[in-house]
Image (spheres, rainbow, N blue to C red):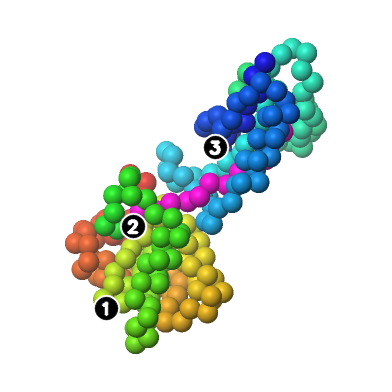
Amino acid sequence: MLYRVILTRNGEYKQTLHRCKTRDTSFINFNRIKEDNIVFFEKKFINYEGIVPVEYKIYTVKDYEDSDKLRIVRNKLGKLVEEPPIFGIWTVLNDSEYQVEENFWLYGSNPLTERKTITDIVKLLMFGMNDKRKTKQVVVVHNKLLIHEEDQFDMVICKCKKDAQRLHHALAKAASDNNIDHLFFMGTARKKMISDFYDIIHKHTKWPYRKIRRTTTRP
């Protein structure tokens, strides 16, 4: 008999996080994985045939046998039913929500091999903050978060506007909680200002305006 702790994404199997031969060991590792699951900025969307919301879960499971006592759960209609073997092969013993750390494409870095976390973005915010004469602006332009002043231009490309807004708000809260001055969080660019930000992006990236106007990373 084999027990596993598995990870799913939007109901699809992603990977096995642990495997063992006893139920007790399986639960010990399930609880360890759940307790160790601490992230700073949770992934909320994925680019999978479009930008879609994402939900991760972990399960502790065993190889299915006809004699297994199946859990009683509520189906989508709210009715209590026996839970069928997950993916048709495993009996579910327990489950829990699971969070995955989001990472970002920072302009100037490889979007596949040099992804950045929110910790990296905070370091960008703090760069040069010892010069009290300068105030950095942080603004959302569609799915892009701009961090700029006369000597700095950084752009974080998020999957969609909601992700960029979440990142903006998380950074603003971190700055407020730590009493960091000289950061001007502007929120989402208004229509009357957005063409100015297009020009700023174009000046530093030489991207065509068609690319700058894109609102998601969907191809």
Q: Which residue is mark 1?
A: 150
Give, as a single range, the part of the protein colored magenta: 93-106
Q: Callout 2: helix, strand or loop?
A: strand
Residue kind at label 3, given as amino acid type: Arg
Residue under circle 2? 106
Q: Toward the viewer: 42 or 165?
A: 42
Q: Tell me which amino acid carries mark 1.
A: Glu
Label 3: which residue? 9
Query: Could you give the CA–CA distance between mark 3 and mark 1, rounded to whole angstroms?
Result: 42 Å
Q: Earlier in the sequence, mark 3 or mark 1?
A: 3
Depicted 39 relative to depicted 145: above or below: above
Image quarter hosting the N terminus: top right
Instruction: Say what secondary structure mark 1 lies in.
Output: loop
Of residues 125 and 27, the one drawn nearer to the viewer in this rendering: 27
Q: Are marks 3 and 1 in contact (CB under 8 Å)?
A: no
Left or right of residue 21: residue 10:
left
Kind of element beneath mark 3: strand
| Residue 13 located left or right of residue 72 | left
Q: Is residue 82 left or right of residue 170?
A: right
Alpha carbon of mark 2 to alpha carbon of mark 1: how far?
A: 19 Å
